[in-house]
Image: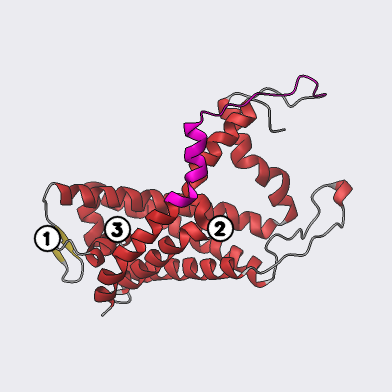
Amino acid sequence: MLITLLNIVAPIAMTIFVVGVGLRLGRFVMALLTKRRFRGISPTFESPPPRLGFWQSLAAVLFGPYQHFYRRANPVWGRGYLAYHVAIITEVIGYSISALIVFGNILLGRPIPDVALHLEHSFNYTPANLLAIIFGNGEELQSRFLFGDFAPYFVGITWVAVIFAVIGNLHLMTVLLRRWSGAVVSDIDPPAHRIRTPGRRPFDRVLIRTIIFCIIWTELLARLQLVPGIVYVHSLLGLALFTLLPFTYLFHMVYNFLAVFYATRRRMARTIA
């Protein structure tokens, strides 16, 4: 039943995802087409920020906000933020590589595993089977097909990512349950001593964080082979996250590379202090 549901829902979900991402990326496309450029620092700016090279600017964009604000303002959120992003970046790269390998084999007309029947060679190109291969890339059958002799190393690396995901999401769920999202719960610096800002518990973040939490635990159960067929639940949850992604705060995962690129250029042009 779950396999049938995935086969029906997957094409609809992916269509919604593609259309949603296309609509949301419109302003970035317009920025590229109009060839906007940064005019640089104002000549009358007193005590301007120092000139930075590319790598220094990139480091300032990626780690500056955490070092100067989040680590001090909300340590629990800060630790969860770091651990979660180590995990999600590793996992997304792994899923992306897996998808490219799977669709490359399909284009070449080569056989792929049938996860439900535990067959190494089949021509089961149904959405449910493709999702089970991609999202189940840490399981023995799928990893051996995807990465061959490199499979044990891939599984080992992604096990580290799963552990970081568990730690990070426990921190972030704690923040949400205690209504610390967006809160300042500790001193940022001496002038801000004892200044606190109340947090909130936004519905969309609770929903997304719960889905992600379930995705992590279903992956653990699938890797440990404790629940037969749990990879299809894992795939369905992943598909739900993909469908919601263009319409929630998680959309930054899609445009993040563009955002980091433009923020780095602005740092280099000294339009960001």
Q: Is residue 190 left or right of residue 174?
A: right
Residue at the image position 47 percent from the left and 54 percent from the top: 87
Label 2 to label 3, Cα distance in Å? 24 Å
Work out which quarter of the rendered image holds the N terminus and state it. bottom left
3 to the left or right of 218? left
Number of the label disc, if any, that sits on residue 249:
2
Give the numbered dot on residue 134.
3
Q: Earlier in the sequence, mark 2 or mark 3?
A: 3
Look at mark 1 in the image and give the residue it sits on: 123
The answer to whether residue 30 is magenta is yes
Tell me which numbered mark, 1 or 2, is placed earlier along the sequence: 1
The residue type indicated by label 2 comes to Tyr
The residue sitting at the top extreme is 43
Label 1 vs 3, first from the N-terminus: 1
Q: Closer to the observer: label 2 or label 3?
A: 2
Q: CA distance from mark 1 to mark 2?
A: 37 Å
Most distant residue in the bottom direction: 1
Residue in front for this viewpoint, 222 or 224: 222
Residue under the image location 69 percent in, 50 percent down: 71
Q: Quadrant of the C terminus?
A: top right
Looking at numbered disc 1 in the image, what kind of residue is underneath it? Phe
Work out whether residue 207 can be spotted. Answer: yes
Residue 224 visible, this orientation: no
Along the viewing direction, whichever of 206 and 114 lies nearer the viewer: 206
Determine which quarter of the picture holds residue 122.
Answer: bottom left
Q: Determine contact: label 2, label 3, CB under 8 Å.
A: no
Region in magenta: 22-46
Q: Residue at x 74, y 27 (%)?
A: 49
Q: Position of residue 238 (x, y in %)?
A: 39, 64
How many circles with numbers are drawn on the protein?
3
Residue 45 located within the stretch drawn in magenta: yes
